[in-house]
Amino acid sequence: MTQSIETREQWLNAFVDAARPVFANAGYPLPDKVRASVGFTSGGRRGKSIGECWSDTASEDGYFEIFLRPSMQSDARICDVLTHELCHAAVGLSAGHGKAFKLCMTAVGLGGKATATTALAAWYAWALPVLEEIGPMPYGALTEGENSGKPKQKTNLLKVECPDCGWLARVTSKHIEPHSHLNCPSPTCDGILSVEA
């Protein structure tokens, strides 16, 4: 490894710098201000997107901001997703996954559906030497483990409501299943509770 890279953001941005001539030679020069980092996309931890490019107009200092999901494990996969997001920056976000995007992705070695590209042999031809040059990413993929965020609710509470008086509560299914019907607990009502999943 000829470069001294200590953080994953330095590593990602070293890949971006190495990809600039590839994009330029393909006829899709990258904007000067592009920054890549690892982080959850706008869908959050439970979102499905593995990469996302934000417009330079959304960034206070005018950068295209690219976020890559921290659960990806392979350096090559991380960089092929990064290349997909760089295509968005190169053609502009307003192009979506339309014709301009498809032409760009093909020109830099990506194939498949525009919404879910995959690296082809042409991508590996230019990207593998870059990955060898910058060395392994200083990174460990995040898995579904312990974190400081709000814990996921372990029980699914069911809504029980009295159609007569409107009394309402949430209870676990184990408190409902043994009973064929539940009487409303309100002292002034003789209604039967209905259960909503």
Image (cartoon, rainbow, N blue to C red):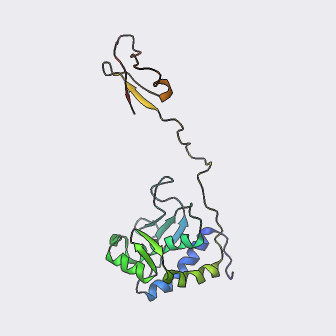
Image position of 153 with respect to 133: above or below: above
| Residue 77 horizontal/vertical position (percent) | 54, 70
Q: Is residue 139 visible?
A: yes
Q: If the image is split into quadrants, where does the N terminus sit? A: bottom right
Q: Is residue 172 visible?
A: no
Q: Residue at x 47, y 22 (%)?
A: 178
Q: If the image is split into quadrants, where does the C terminus sit? A: top left
Residue 159 image-quadrant placement: top left
Q: Residue at x 52, y 39 (%)?
A: 153
Q: Residue at x 46, y 55 (%)?
A: 47
Left or right of residue 25, residue 94 in this image: left
Residue 191 image-quadrant placement: top left
Nearer to the camera, 168 or 89: 168
Nearer to the camera, 106 or 6: 106
| Residue 31 horizontal/vertical position (percent) | 44, 78
| Residue 95 horizontal/vertical position (percent) | 33, 72
Left or right of residue 39, residue 3 in this image: right
Query: Among all residues in the image, which is located at the extreme top?
Result: 188
Nearer to the camera, 7 or 97: 97
